[in-house]
Image: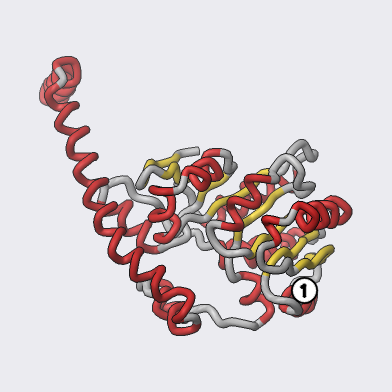
Amino acid sequence: MKTIQLFGMKIDSLRMSEAVERVRSWIDEPFERMRYVVTPNLDHAVLFQDRADLRAAYADASLTIADGQPLIWASRLLRKPLPERVAGSDLVPRLFDDADRRGRELTVFLLGAAPGVGARAADAIAKRWKHVRVVGVESPPLGFDKSEAETERLLAAIEQAAPDLLLVGLGAPKQELWIHRHRERIHARAALGIGAVIDFLAGERQRAPVWMQRCGIEWLHRISQEPKRLGKRYAYDAWRFPQLLLREAFSRKAKETDAATDPEVAYRVAATASRRSAV
């Protein structure tokens, strides 16, 4: 599987259909260990620079897919293009569609969102996808990740349900760090950190219109819904991201310059050009 390096992250270069196929293959295989997916967006790219714990979570992920449209644009600008955006908000319903298309049951555990929201999401899933069965719903309290007793309770609940798919909607980077920290004890075939997807499924929040998603301004819709929580974060990301982009561009240019001045590389380039001119 082809990958590209972008802002220090190793991102898998694939389309939505290929991501669905990859996760489905984990579910279909005999269970050996839990595999998990991370879905970087612009905010992840910024956090990744300063957080060793998040870098460790990314290093152990089995699949890294570009969720944010700005990352797709950046990859193209830097001449290492990703084929398309693979948003977690789209990947989850596509996995559910795939289960219905194949007529094969997919069991799901929902972890996250406010009390009652997970139950409403489970009802909505049951009505829309006849082959998707929610086998567990948990809405842990704030600070649960610092409570050993609460963590043990959640891990036991997941183990008892033994879902095919664990959907963790705790927000970034908490969801990625929690999955990574307990990856050896999570009894699910696959886990996804999916942000607000449980809220979307429950109808608690509405996603941005498709045209906003395609234009890469979904963040405007999100900030209009949660200005206090997201305003400062998005302002910081908007300040940091151009710096990351420039650093990546200069780093790439430096590598190209080093390669061009390397005698062995120069010889291979000249030899290739000579063969082509002889044809």
Residue, x 59% and y 82% (percent of image)? 205
At label 1, counting other C-alpha atoms closer than 10 Å, the crowd grade (few under 14, some 14-19, many 20 or more) is many
Q: Is residue 38 above or below residue 233?
A: above
Viewer-proximal residue, 244 or 254?
A: 244
SS at badge 1: helix
Residue 73 picture quarter:
bottom left
Q: What residue type is labelled 1?
A: Ala
Residue at numbered disc 1: 122
Please name the residue shown 66% across and 60% down the image: 168
- From this view, report whether residue 59 is shown above or below residue 42: above
Q: Where is residue 105 in the image (x, y as percent from the top left)?
A: 82, 59
- Relative to the observer, which residue lies in front, 126 or 206? 206
Where is residue 268? Give x, y as percent. 19, 19
Task: Note whether residue 275 is visible.
Answer: no
Residue 144 x %, y %: 70, 61
Residue 181 placement, left or right of 119: left
Question: What residue appears at the point 30 percent right and 53 percent down from the top-left corner?
Answer: 76
Q: Where is residue 25 in the image (x, y as percent from the top left)?
A: 69, 45
Specify whether 53 is left or right of 278: right
Front residue of 181/26: it is 181
